[in-house]
């Protein structure tokens, strides 16, 4: 393991010279503590930074990176801290480089249908700004109200709209990046095509801050859909629910904009949290949420009529149809608040993020339930059904903090390895961070070699977010 | 049991804008929806219908022809039929005139045991129309109702949410009941409900059909006059100092505070 330098008060003086006194936190444990963890497992995985620096421009980021490299101080870039794999946790202390002050929407270019933003823009703020101009930003992680665009790019975040619009990488046209040597480079831009050389933009997407700091993002916007309709469909078994996906998508002749899944246990927890009751809460083992977009109400009617009938033919217990904003909100509140509802029971609930071929979802859910039985814990599961992306969330059965960390890691590892056995991967959208790096090393051994070569060429001194993705 | 529910079409937005010159709500490009607070009244009537054989629920609204869509939504939630009171003469009706038209419509349809209404509409926010309909029909009105039970003798036992507690009221039908949100949690229409609502025919009744004199409705029949509409004057004004350089922005604030003799 590499030895890094400790930050001195002299170092802090220099950092304050770069980006003003108030933009540096040092020797203030209560303020530093907020930057010691993300949303994964709460204090389980926390590591304190020595200092937090909050630049407000690419130039300041560049100076900080140069300084850290020269002083051999590790740098951990951080967005909103809404990640679920520990990617922004400063494993080796050092500097947390928080992008929270770089939060400007620089441009909504309607002619090119491109947004240019700084990394600290909250995803939903961009969605609203684009909407004002009749455009739509289709990156939609479930943490849309808190996550930053920069974090979405760094982890290649997914969300509920991936089935139709793809994950974050599908929306990024260009990036400005501060490389580990402090140089500021722009890859891509407002253009939609570029076959000149390596696709550097996509190399940085999902790199989790290990190759550089993203300081500006060019995003693709699409025309705003006229109307939406949401269907909530309870099924008595997971197998029946999943078997309905392909026929419904195929018969609709348009891709749904969301196909979400919650198991019966998840619905019970979320409904209790939201003070709601759903029909069939005793009988249903699975609920699907399907959303379609269309230009007008006639198209909406055709879509829900066709899909609704097919769901019933496929054995749905009933089909509930929300064609207005109030009813849609009732449906989505259940899905969006799912994790919060579990945190109300267990604040440190860890969230898995496995992906499997759609056809393997029933086998995966069955396995998750078997693992729950083996360890005598409840494991609610929700996810993005049409992507085969599931989030199992084991709830502490009363173990002590340390015991539970060990047990929950075992549970999630067993589930992740089973996902790979079923043709999937250990992360669909949350990334690897440091919590899953062992799983990555087991399941993508050959690829890690290539990743390490890339890392070494960009960051030979291993300053950028050390300890993430792989051991180096 | 024969039940009616009064429903209203309201703009589907939180940001209603008023034309400062005419004082009229700017409805251009605004989508409409069933008044969210009316959904609780619809849900209550539909739930009671399920408990009483041979009972019916009629959703009634006064509005423009496009308001048929909210009656269809009420049918999708379980109402048996929708009746729209629609006539150019009704345009511009205030709460009294609206209540008059609704009362006449209900009289024409005849024989309702319970008439449900929401607490108020999210656009006008007056909460007057429901009680005013009861007055014009000369039947009792129970407002802020959070629970309704039918007793064995057919009497209605209602719980009213009042300041500091609850009030239990026993009443004979016919009665008008306006409900609060606590009464139930309206759920979403199912496939069969949606399909039924699409093929349902909405009965449209004009001023002539329900025997409303044009002098008693619309602007002419409205005793209320909107003489002026204005936005509340802000007593405090915010000022934003922005600059890409935080030090310069901070200096602007310091200068401002010095100018005000605060620093």
Image (cartoon, coloured by chain):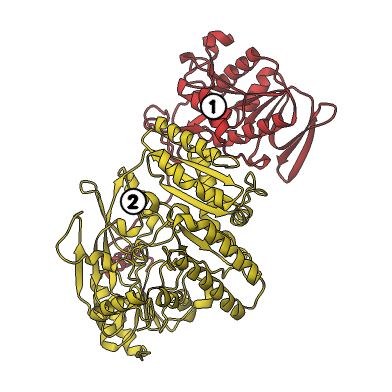
Chain colours: A yellow, B red
* SS for dot 2: loop
Residue at image position (59%, 56%) is: A266
- Please tell me whether residue A360 is drawn above or below residue A448 in the rendered image: above
Tell us which disc is closer to us: 2 or 1.
1
Q: Quadrant of residue A102?
A: bottom left
Q: Pinpoint residue A369: horizontal percent, then vertical percent.
A: 60, 63
Q: Pinpoint residue A94: horizontal percent, then vertical percent.
A: 38, 83
- Please tell me whether residue B132 is drawn above or below residue A207 in the rendered image: above
Looking at the image, which residue sits at the far left? A196
Q: Quadrant of residue A58?
A: bottom left
- Please tell me whether residue A182 is drawn above or below residue A79 in the rendered image: below
Establish whether labels 2 and 1 are both on one chain: no
Q: Is residue A384 visible?
A: no
Mark 2 Cα shell of 10 Å, populated few (<14), some (14-19), many (≥20) = many
Per the image, the residue denoted by label 1 is B197
Query: In terms of depth relative to the viewer, which is nearer, A251 or B36?
Result: A251
The answer for which chain carries disc 1 is B
Query: In terms of depth relative to the viewer, which is nearer, A358 or A215?
Result: A358
Q: How many marks?
A: 2
Q: Pinpoint residue A4: horizontal percent, then vertical percent.
A: 35, 89
Q: Is residue B80 left or right of residue A128?
A: right
User: Quarter of the image containing the N terminus of chain A?
Assistant: bottom left
Q: Pinpoint residue B9: horizontal percent, then vertical percent.
A: 51, 29
Q: Is residue B250 left or right of residue B163?
A: left
- Please tell me whether residue B94 is drawn above or below residue A23 in the rendered image: above
Q: Is residue A204 visible?
A: yes
Mark 1 Cα shell of 10 Å, populated few (<14), some (14-19), many (≥20) = many
Per the image, the residue denoted by label 2 is A137
Residue at image position (58%, 27%) is: B75
Q: Which mark is residue B134?
A: none
């Amino acid at each position: 393991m590499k030895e890094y330098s400790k930050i001195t008060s002299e170092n802090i003086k220099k950092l304050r010279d770069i980006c003003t006194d108030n933009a540096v936190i040092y020797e203030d444990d209560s303020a530093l503590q907020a930057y010691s963890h993300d949303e994964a497992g709460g204090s389980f995985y926390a590591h304190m930074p020595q200092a937090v620096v909050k630049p407000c421009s690419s130039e300041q980021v560049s100076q900080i990176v140069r300084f850290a490299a020269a002083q051999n101080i590790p740098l951990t870039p951080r967005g909103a801290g809404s990640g679920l794999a520990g990617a922004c946790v400063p494993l080796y202390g050092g500097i947390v480089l928080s992008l929270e002050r770089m939060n400007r929407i620089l441009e909504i270019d309607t002619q090119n249908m491109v947004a240019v933003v700084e990394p600290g823009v909250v995803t939903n703020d961009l969605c609203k700004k684009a909407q004002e101009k009749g455009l739509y930003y289709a990156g939609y992680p479930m943490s849309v109200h808190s996550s930053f665009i920069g974090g979405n790019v760094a982890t290649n975040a997914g969300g509920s709209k991936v089935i139709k619009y793809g994950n974050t990488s599908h929306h990024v046209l260009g990036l400005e990046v501060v490389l580990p040597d402090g140089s500021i480079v722009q890859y891509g831009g407002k253009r939609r095509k570029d076959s000149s050389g390596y696709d550097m933009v996509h190399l940085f997407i999902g790199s989790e801050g290990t190759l550089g700091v993203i300081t500006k993002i060019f995003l693709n916007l699409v025309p705003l859909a006229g109307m939406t309709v949401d269907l909530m469909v309870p099924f008595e078994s997971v197998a029946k629910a999943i078997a309905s996906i392909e026929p419904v998508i195929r018969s609709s002749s348009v891709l749904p904009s969301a196909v979400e899944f919650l198991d019966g246990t998840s619905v019970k927890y979320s409904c209790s949290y939201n003070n709601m009751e759903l029909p069939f809460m005793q009988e249903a083992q699975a609920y699907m949420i399907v959303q379609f977009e269309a230009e007008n109400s006639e198209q909406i009617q055709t879509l829900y009529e066709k899909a609704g009938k097919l769901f019933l033919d496929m054995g749905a217990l009933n089909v509930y149809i929300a064609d207005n904003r109030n009813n849609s909100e009732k449906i989505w509140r259940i899905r969006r608040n799912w994790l919060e509802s579990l945190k109300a029971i267990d604040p440190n609930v860890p969230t898995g993020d496995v992906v499997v071929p759609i056809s393997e979802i029933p086998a995966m859910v069955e396995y998750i339930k078997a693992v729950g039985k083996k360890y005598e814990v409840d494991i609610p599961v929700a996810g993005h059904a049409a992507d085969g992306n599931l989030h199992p969330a084991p709830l502490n059965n009363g173990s002590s903090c340390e015991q539970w960390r060990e047990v929950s890691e075992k549970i999630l590892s067993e589930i992740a390895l089973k996902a790979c056995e079923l043709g999937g991967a250990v992360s669909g959208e949350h990334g690897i961070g440091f919590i899953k790096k062992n799983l990555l090393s087991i399941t993508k051994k050959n690829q890690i070699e290539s990743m390490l070569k890339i890392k070494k060429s960009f960051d030979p001194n291993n300053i950028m977010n050390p300890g993430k993705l792989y051991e180096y | 049991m024969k039940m009616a529910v009064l429903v209203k079409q309201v703009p589907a937005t939180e940001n209603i804008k008023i034309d400062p010159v005419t004082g009229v709500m700017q409805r251009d490009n605004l989508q409409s929806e069933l008044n969210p607070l009316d959904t609780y009244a619809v849900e209550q009537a539909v739930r009671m219908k399920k408990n009483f054989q041979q009972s019916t629920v009629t959703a009634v609204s006064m509005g423009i022809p496009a308001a048929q869509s909210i009656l269809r939504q009420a049918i999708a939630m379980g109402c048996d039929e929708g009746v729209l009171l629609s006539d150019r003469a009704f345009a511009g009706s205030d709460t009294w005139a609206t209540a008059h038209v609704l009362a006449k419509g209900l009289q024409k349809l005849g024989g309702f045991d319970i008439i449900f209404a929401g607490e108020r509409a999210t656009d006008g926010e007056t909460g007057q129309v429901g009680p005013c309909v009861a007055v014009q029909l000369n039947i009792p009105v129970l407002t802020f109702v959070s629970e309704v039970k039918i007793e064995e003798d057919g009497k209605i036992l209602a719980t009213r949410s009042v300041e500091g507690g609850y009030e239990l009221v026993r009443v004979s039908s016919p009665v008008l009941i306006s409900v609060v949100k606590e009464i139930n949690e309206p759920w979403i229409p199912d496939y069969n409900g949606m399909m039924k609502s699409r093929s349902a025919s909405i009965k449209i009744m004009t001023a002539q059909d329900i025997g409303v004199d044009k002098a008693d409705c619309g602007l002419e029949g409205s005793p209320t006059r909107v003489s002026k509409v204005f936005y509340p004057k802000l007593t405090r004004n915010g000022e934003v100092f922005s600059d890409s350089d935080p030090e310069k922005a901070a200096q602007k604030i310091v200068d401002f505070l010095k100018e005000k003799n605060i620093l």
